[in-house]
Image: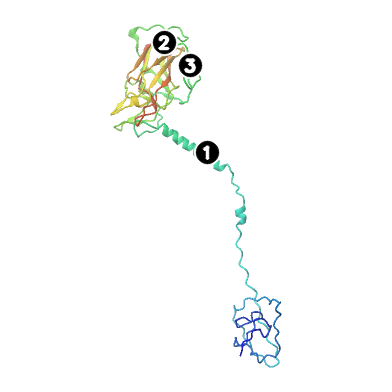
Amino acid sequence: MTSPTYCTSCGHDLGIGRFCTNCGRPVPGRHPEATPASTLPAAPVVPPPSGQLPPAARYPLFADAPPTVMAPGPGAPPPSAPPQHAPPPSPPMAPSSRSSASAPDRRPVWIPWLVALVLLALIGGVGGVLLLGGDDSDGDQASDERGSSQSTDSTRPSDDGSSDQPDQPDSTGTGAPAQEPDPDDVVDLTSSVTAEVPAIAPPSRDTRNRPVRFRPANMWDDKPRTAWRMPGDGTGQTLTFAFDEDVVITEVGMINGYAKIDGPTNWYTSNRRIRTVQWEFDDGTRVTQDLDDQQVIQMIDLGPVETRSVTVHLLGVSAPAKGADGRDFTAISEIRFLGAPR
């Protein structure tokens, strides 16, 4: 039996399957349960016009087993078409990310700038600490040790309102001339003072790993190897020394640097040294002294001056030594006040 090219039920163009893709009927000659073409009423099958599109196929066609078709008896109506199944529901669409992607970024625009400013401030602070760090050993630690003194802010202006070099009025002052004390009464008054300094350098360790501290009391302990020391250039800074009572001072002086030799290293030449200093007394008298690079106490005669305190203005300070031994600190190893109690 020749397989037809058109469906014997609906006239649809047949493909290569065993069922009509339009009505689902078994194709005679292809499916064993199809009614032979010779048993069907002889009726002409008219193919659809060439310009007419075939009806849409119905799906699914092969998902279920083919229905059992009973051969109709003579004169029986043709079997009904198999039931149609509704197409499976479409899978749910994933939520679009367009809305979230297109949503504007509502973060405040100033937050990145704030973070940048904080980072710059931290970097600047660390750089300042490192710049002021160097010392005569690698064991420096911060310290607030002051002995019998009080430390003031390193940016504290001088008594005349200037943070740079102070004014230099007449050295005669405004007080009445003090009476010259008897030479036998002249003593070293330094041990009875207290000191107020602009800053104190952190402690260190020497070449034998012994601790070294730079408290103000080192300036009157009669040990040139010890010193008061502050970080950086002390130009324009002041130190104030106070006595327990009124005194008449006849001479003043100092060792104008860190007069210590530690093994092969001379810390006097490695640190800064004071070049010019001005001594100021209660009556306004100011006496300027130029200092040499000598690791000894350099004294100057005043003539008798009655006072209860002495303010020391650092007018000129040298640069630190260059090279690995250079240290950016200003130091005074010893200070001296000679005179008599009032």
Q: Residue at 34% of width from left, 7% of height from top?
A: 183
Could you tell me which secondary element the residue under label 2 belongs to? strand
Of badges 2 and 1, nearer the viewer stands: 1
Q: Residues within 10 Å of mark 3 (few under 14, many from 20)?
A: few
Q: Amino acid at mark 3?
A: Asp
Question: Colour mode?
Answer: rainbow
Label 2 vs 3, first from the N-terminus? 3
Please name the residue that numbered disc 1 is placed on.
Answer: 117
The disc placed on residue 305 is 2
Q: Quadrant of residue 309?
A: top left
Of badges 2 and 3, nearer the viewer stands: 3
Examine the rendered structure and indicate whether residue 155 appears above or below residue 90: above
Q: Amino acid at mark 2?
A: Val
Q: Residues within 10 Å of mark 1 (few under 14, many from 20)?
A: few
Q: Position of residue 202 (x, y in %)?
A: 39, 30
Q: Is residue 22 left or right of residue 177?
A: right
Examine the rendered structure and indicate whether residue 24 appears above or below residue 313: below
Residue sitting nearer the eye, 4 or 174: 4
Q: CA distance from mark 2 to mark 3?
A: 20 Å
Q: CA distance from mark 2 to mark 1?
A: 54 Å
Label 3 vs 1, first from the N-terminus? 1
Could you tell me which secondary element the residue under label 1 belongs to? helix
Please name the residue that numbered disc 3 is placed on.
Answer: 167
Q: Is residue 13 left or right of residue 186?
A: right
The reply to whether discs 2 and 3 touch (Cβ–Cβ < 8 Å) is: no
